[in-house]
Amino acid sequence: AQKITQTQPGMFVQEKEAVTLDCTYDTSDQSYGLFWYKQPSSGEMIFLIYQGSYDEQNATEGRYSLNFQKARKSANLVISASQLGDSAMYFCAMRETPYNQGGKLIFGQGTELSVKP
Amino acid sequence: DVKVTQSSRYLVKRTGEKVFLECVQDMDHENMFWYRQDPGLGLRLIYFSYDVKMKEKGDIPEGYSVSREKKERFSLILESASTNQTSMYLCASSGGGVATDTQYFGPGTRLTVL
């Protein structure tokens, strides 16, 4: 069965420093997608970044980058130059079913990031 | 920008009441989803729909039903609310993002059942 594991329940980082949030996954599929979401205390889940299993380049979106290591089945999120507004829960997710079957996602348990001034 | 809206941010209901949670998306997405989120349990899928009038059970459908009469609207129904349904409910839609299956979420509804 497919599974997403986030081993860091909570992390602290100093403002302006970079931080890496870990995510490992387990799947026997060759084609899959990996996602990261941010959830601030307000509750809304905000899409950050996507990596397809066949993408050769690591995905980047502004200060977010995804360190994709396919052989190790890891998809770590790197946030550069942390800001106070980055304090939130971060969830890693993987597409469980193809798009034409609903595109279901499975989520990890999340990592709570706190940025210190 | 994708916009997913939910009818209420906060809702308080009594045990046994019928509760409707509404979700509307404005991006012509085929797929819509309802999750609940509880501390320590993460996000759990209740129901999803990949077309109008179609619905599929997720991981925890018991005690819930859904309705999708129009493409943009997906309703979650608690037929007889119970205290163990106190939770954060999140709606999402997908079908046109960076990846075609990127899910975009609404702001969530915090439901309390007394």
Image (cartoon, rainbow, N blue to C red):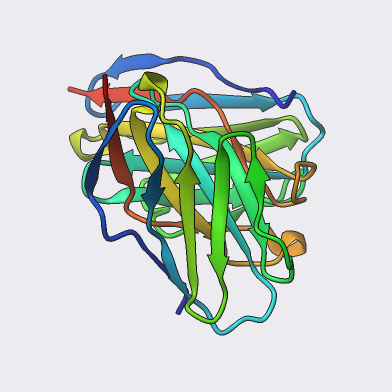
At a point 35% along the width and 31% down the height, the residue shown is A88
Q: Quadrant of residue A52?
A: bottom right
> Which of these two is toward me, A75 or A100?
A75
At a point 32% along the width and 53% down the height, the residue shown is A109
Q: Quadrant of residue A7?
A: bottom left
Q: Position of residue A34 (x, y in %)?
A: 58, 59
At a point 68% along the width and 23% down the height, the residue shown is B3
> Which of these two is toward me, A39 or B13?
A39
* B109 on left or right of A93: left
Q: Position of residue B73 (x, y in %)?
A: 68, 29
Q: Residue furthest bottom?
A: A28
Residue A24 lies, with reference to residue B63, above or below; the image says below
Q: Quadrant of the N terminus of chain A?
A: bottom left
* A106 on left or right of B93: left
* B29 on left or right of A27: right
Residue A34 lies, with reference to residue B67, above or below; the image says below
At a point 50% along the width and 41% down the height, the residue shown is A37
Q: Position of residue A73 (x, y in %)?
A: 49, 75
Q: Is there any visible trace of residue B107 in the rendered image?
A: yes
Q: How many marks?
A: 0
Q: Quadrant of residue B93?
A: top right
Q: Position of residue A59 (x, y in %)?
A: 66, 52
Q: Quadrant of the C terminus of chain A?
A: top left
